[in-house]
Amino acid sequence: MQKETQETLCSKVEESYHIIGKKWMGLIIHCLMEEPKRFGEIHAFIPDLSKRVLNERMKELEECGVVLRNVITERPVRTEYSLTKKGAELGKALKAVEAWADKWL
């Protein structure tokens, strides 16, 4: 493998670990894999996660294109979070890691 290709690959892998390596990120993505959820539903799924940190993580996931924030204007107005295509693919990769951890750890 050429050095430039190795550096590009290493950079991409490092960036992906930066996203999923933060505390709670994997659980948040896991929570959103089935269907869109409201902030309170995500918080109820991960009760040890403070609302402040959940808010920070949701913004980070939205900024990196993993989560989509959707404001639904019909009454009552609500906000739902869902995985983007990028986020759904990441979720599948995390499922594989989950299966590996279940088997080996």
Image (cartoon, rainbow, N blue to C red):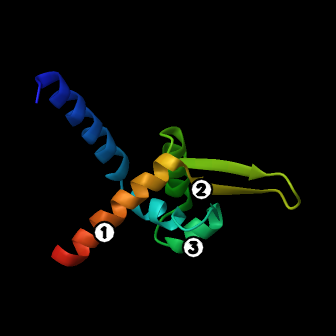
Residue drawn at 64 percent across, 48 percent down: 69
User: Which SS class for mark 1?
Assistant: helix
Q: Picture coordinates of residue 29 (x, y %)?
A: 46, 59
Residue 98, disc: 1
From the image, tell me which residue sits under label 2. 82
- How far apart are labels 1 and 2 at the CA level? 20 Å
- How far apart are labels 3 and 1 at the CA level? 21 Å
Question: Taking 76 as reference, is 28 left or right?
Answer: left
3 or 1: mark nearer the eye: 1
Residue drawn at 19 percent across, 27 percent down: 5
From the image, tell me which residue sits under label 3. 44
- How far apart are labels 2 and 3 at the CA level? 16 Å
Residue 9, disc: none
- Is residue 14 visible in the rendered structure shown here? yes
Residue positioned most to the right: 75
Inspect the image, locate mark 1, and give the three-letter code of the amino acid beneath it: Glu
